[in-house]
Image (cartoon, rainbow, N blue to C red):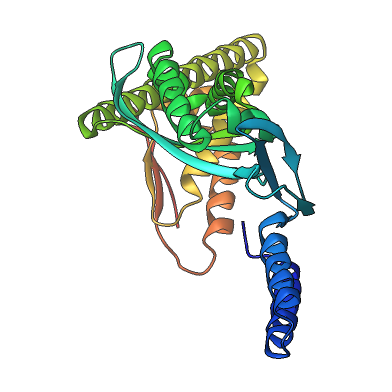
Amino acid sequence: MTPNPITLAIAVVLVGLGVLAILGGLLALGAALIAVAIVIIAALKMARQWERAITLRAGRFRGVSGPGLFVIVPILDTVAAVIDTRLRTTQFVAEQTLTKDTVPVDVDAIIFWIVIDAQRAALEVVNYGEAVAWVAQTSLREMIGANELAMLLSNRKAMDTELRDTIGGKTAQWGIDVRSVEIRDVRIPVALQDAMSRQAQAERERQARVILGAAEAEIANKFLEAARTYADNPVALHLRGMNMLYESVKERGSTIIVPSSAIDSMNLGGLAGLTALSQVSKATTPDQGSDTQTRPGPWAPSTTRSR
């Protein structure tokens, strides 16, 4: 406990009066004042707002005093302990602890706890702070051994809740309430980290291949639908062929070799088809005079050239 300024002030005043009385020849009065000052120093105590004083009378529990001023009987009463009722934090670790799937891990955690019953904290356990730390560490090891590594890495909130309930159940008999437990870090061997990284990469590649296969299947279905449409509608197929040819010859300086059968099917062998294709080519390259040639293969007799 911190020194009581009120008690010290009263004691100093009484001692000063006693000294003055002794100097004035009043020995009995001076001795009495000094004795009263000593008794006040021994009897008048003060606890701060967050402190609770455990007092014993003749070795037996008398009560919990504080906060503020309180009086004890000198010699007969003693202040056995002063309990801090503020929120505390304790860090604890579990090193090289095996999980349920036999993976060694290092886990770092922190616990937030508070004393809610000062009497039990002082009388039921010698050092409640150290006891909380050991209970937290053993509970952490038990929790690690009962869960797999994937659970520790992916579901920390559930692990925090489980630890809080486990530790709180053990410390409740000491008058200590566990407010929360937080796992700060889970460290695994470097070799295992590399293996997990390769596994994750392989899984991503597998998913990419599955997505690509699904896209290919969808594209094939679309082509099949288009083929059915063109099979039922020759005009649409004809227009599609002309569009493809137009897209091919509109680029400057391109040379396209087209089979004569394709030209006959699109009716480009006639004069109207040749005239239309020539106009399209000239409209595409009006100022460069580039050569755009559309020649059937060696198997076809006709060649179309537009300049």
Q: Position of residue 213 (x, y in %)?
A: 44, 17
Most foreground residue, 266 or 224: 224
Tell me if residue 98 comes above or below residue 295 in the rendering: above
Front residue (pair 82, 112): 82
Which percent across, then down, holds residue 57? 67, 36
Position of residue 109 relative to residue 29, above or below, is: above
User: At 72% from the left edge and 74% from the top edge, which residue is drawn?
Assistant: 28
Number of numbered discs on residues: 0
Point out the residue furthest to the left here.
Answer: 191
Left or right of 100? Residue 131 is right
Query: Is residue 210 toward the left or the right of residue 125 in the image?
Result: left
Quick check: 197 left or right of 279?
A: left
Occupied quadrant, residue 161: top right
Q: Is residue 190 above or below residue 25?
A: above
**In this view of the protein, can residue 21 be seen by the observer?**
yes
From the top left corner, tell me how far across and down residue 58 is, in percent.
Answer: 63, 34
Please state which of residues 198 and 215 is positioned toward the viewer in this rendering.
Answer: 198
| Vertical placement of residue 215 versus 232, above or below | below
Q: Quadrant of the N terminus?
A: bottom right
Q: Residue at x 28, y 13 (%)?
A: 102
User: Is residue 47 visible to us here?
Assistant: no
Where is the C terminus found, in terms of image quarters? bottom left
Left or right: where 22 falls relative to 145: right
Name the residue located 66 percent from the left edge and 40 percent from the top edge: 54
Q: Residue at x 62, y 20 (%)?
A: 173
Percent position of residue 304, x then y = 43, 43
